[in-house]
Amino acid sequence: MLKPDYPIRTERLLLRPLDASTDVDAVHAYQSREEVCRYIPYSPRSKEEVAERLASGPLRSTLEEAGQALGLAVVVHETNELIGDLMLAWISAEHRTGELGYVINPDYQGHGYATEAVRALFPLAFDQLGLHRVIARIDARNDASARVLRRLGLRQEAHLLENEWFRGEWTDEIDFAILAAEWRAGQASA
């Protein structure tokens, strides 16, 4: 079980559960953009779709069993602006595996926010939830996301050729992973 103590603080950010009553406009500001949705599983969303997803979607603030996913807002501490969101999914209890995902509003990209926010997921995944392995799967054309994952110490494990029919074309997927022991070793040397 994972029940984080919110907000989770990093140097510049606060991570907290997404809020259906206050976050719709900020989330819509980036989830409605074609360039944001280019490499992720959903198409640009209307304000109504964002509101419905936040109110009744699958993302949660706690994880009680495998198959559930944590959804967190990424907020700049200094300005209180919501600039993106994170997902940590508990994939398998037996194999102690999780998956992470993230999106940052393009207006805030290039400042290290994705790296800083995702880094805060590892103590949740490895120390609190007790996962052995965390993966991330990205579209092979998403070079910026690959750089974030490599900066965080994830290794590329696979390049799957034309494995998904995505928006009218075959696309490649790159799979990254990090083990709890690797993450801990990186923490010890930092």
Image: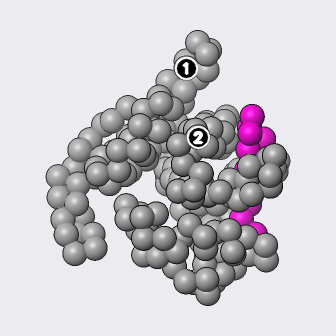
Tell me which segment is drawn in magenta.
8-19
Callout 1 amino acid: Gly
Nearest the viewer among 137 and 9 is 9
Q: Mark 1 points at which residue?
A: 186
Q: Residue furthest front?
A: 107
Callout 2 amino acid: His
Using the rendered image of the protein, determine whether residue 130 is visible from the camera's viewpoint: no
Query: Which secondary structure lies at badge 1?
Result: helix
Magenta stretch encompasses residue 13 = yes
Q: Image point 69% across, 75% down: which residue?
A: 24
**How many numbered marks, from 0 up?**
2
Residue 9 image offset from top left, x and y in percent: 78, 41
Q: Which residue lies furthest to the bottom in this view?
A: 48
Q: Is residue 64 left or right of residue 8?
A: left
Labels 1 and 2 touching (C-beta < 8 A)? no
- Badge 2: how crowded within 10 Å, few (<14), some, or many (20+)? few
Query: Which secondary structure lies at badge 2?
Result: loop
Q: Is residue 37 left or right of residue 28?
A: left
Q: Mark 2 points at which residue?
A: 111
For the residues labelled 1 and 2, the Cα–Cα distance comes to 22 Å
